[in-house]
Every structure is written in structure tokens, then in C-alpha cells.
Image (cartoon, rainbow, N blue to C red):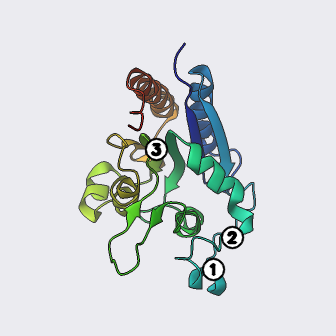
Amino acid sequence: MPPSLSAMLVYCHPVPDSFAAALRDRVMATLTRAGVNAALFDLYADGFDPALSRSERLAHLDPDLRPPDLEDQFAALARADLLIFVYPTWWYGPPAMLKGWLDRVLRAGIAFRLPEGSDLIEPMLTQVRQIAVVTTYGSPWWLIHYVGDAGRRTIARGLQLLCPNARRPLWLGLYGMDKAGDEDRRRFLDRVDLRLAQAVRRLRRRPPAQPG
């Protein structure tokens, strides 16, 4: 019997019938077909508050002062083998709502530890074995490359540091979304399906090492 896998899918788009919603649904269908237990967090639909309050910021490094409204997020993150984001790229980065999620959820005691007297964090998301991003870009690839793709640096590099056992991030982007036709979108949906299913199969072939 294949090993059980869990996924946390963080979805961020304000328009219910957007192409991003079609991508979200395709990702969920792929995970379900592969037998992955997936928890979906739709930030806009759930009414997620992205603002880091003064009190929360002051307690950000205290692992014992966790915001109670985020407990379901913390629980899903703690059991996730796959951490998946679906969102549009706006101004070369993730939407403000998703940036707020990173600010509030990836906190001390959940995503990292900061030992006393040290300026180097210790990553805590050791169970995450695959980070995946499905996003769209209004601009063509060459312009995103020229500007530097800040969103990719934040998630594929920054977040990867908190997940030391994760494979190389799976980055799936549809460039030139503003001019993409129906066939372009269909092909991208199929590509997302294929690549994510492949990633799940790779994880199943290489289960996590058991602690000695």
C-alpha cells in the first residue's frame, strides 16, 4: 500500500470564477486522484486577515503566544508533506493577502526556532518534502526575468530554507497571461496536472527517512 501523504494548499485570488480558481480546482483534483489528503485554505473566501497587528508583531518570536485564529493553519502546516500555493503574480510578486499569510503563519515555534543568543534560525518544517507554486504572470517571461521575479525568490528560495528536507521547488508559471487564449490555458492546466502527479509519485517512491 502506498504511503499516505498530506498536502496543504494555500489559494489566493479575490474573484471566484477566475482562471486561478480553475487552477486551484485542477490541483485539488490531481491530489484527490493521487490519494493525497489535501487541506485547502482559500484566503479570500475564508476571510483571512493578512494584517500583522502590533501585539502580534511584538509576540512574533514567542512560540507560546500563538494567534488563536490561525490554529487550523498551524495544524495543517505541521502535517503537510506537500506545501502548495496557487495565486496570480501581481507587480512581480504574490498578492498582498498571500504576503500577509507568510508574515503571520510562518512564525517562531511553527516554521522556525531562534535560539537565544543566535542570529541564525533553525528550520522546523522538516516534514515538508515538496513545495509547489502554480501562478500566472501578465507579462512575458523575458520581462519577469529582467525584473527578477521577486515572488519566486521569496517562496522558492526563502521558504525553502525553512523546509530543509524538501526537494527542489516545483514552479509552474503561465507567462503572458494577458494574451493567453483558451488553448494556452488548457495546455497549462494539463501541465499542472502532469507535473504535480509526477511530484506525488516521486515522494511515494522515496518515503521520509525514519529517525534513528
Label 1 vs label 2: CA separation? Answer: 7 Å
Q: Which residue is mark 2?
A: 67
Q: Residue at x 51, y 69 (%)?
A: 108
Q: Residue at x 69, y 62 (%)?
A: 70
Label 2 residue SS: loop
Picture layout, residue 132 above or below residue 30 = below
Total labels drawn:
3
Label 1 residue SS: helix
Q: Residue at x 52, y 32 (%)?
A: 182
Quadrant of residue 113 within the rendered picture: bottom left
Quarter of the image containing the N terminus?
Answer: top right
* Marking on residue 128: 3
Label 3 vs label 1: CA separation? Answer: 25 Å
x and y percent of residue 174 in the render?
42, 42
* Marking on residue 56: 1
**First reached walking from the N terminus: tag 3 or tag 1:** 1
Tag 1 near tag 2, CB within 8 Å: yes
Label 2 vs label 3: CA separation? Answer: 22 Å
Q: Amino acid at mark 3?
A: Val
x and y percent of residue 42 in the render?
68, 51
Tag 3 near tag 1, CB within 8 Å: no
Q: Amino acid at mark 2?
A: Pro
The residue closer to the viewer here, 145 or 78, is: 78
Quadrant of residue 115 within the rendered picture: bottom left
As drawn, the residue found furthest toward the front would be: 212
Res 180 visible: yes
x and y percent of residue 40 in the render?
66, 43
Label 3 residue SS: loop
Q: Amino acid at mark 1?
A: Glu
* Badge 1: residue crowd in 10 Å (few <14, some 14–19, many ≥20): some
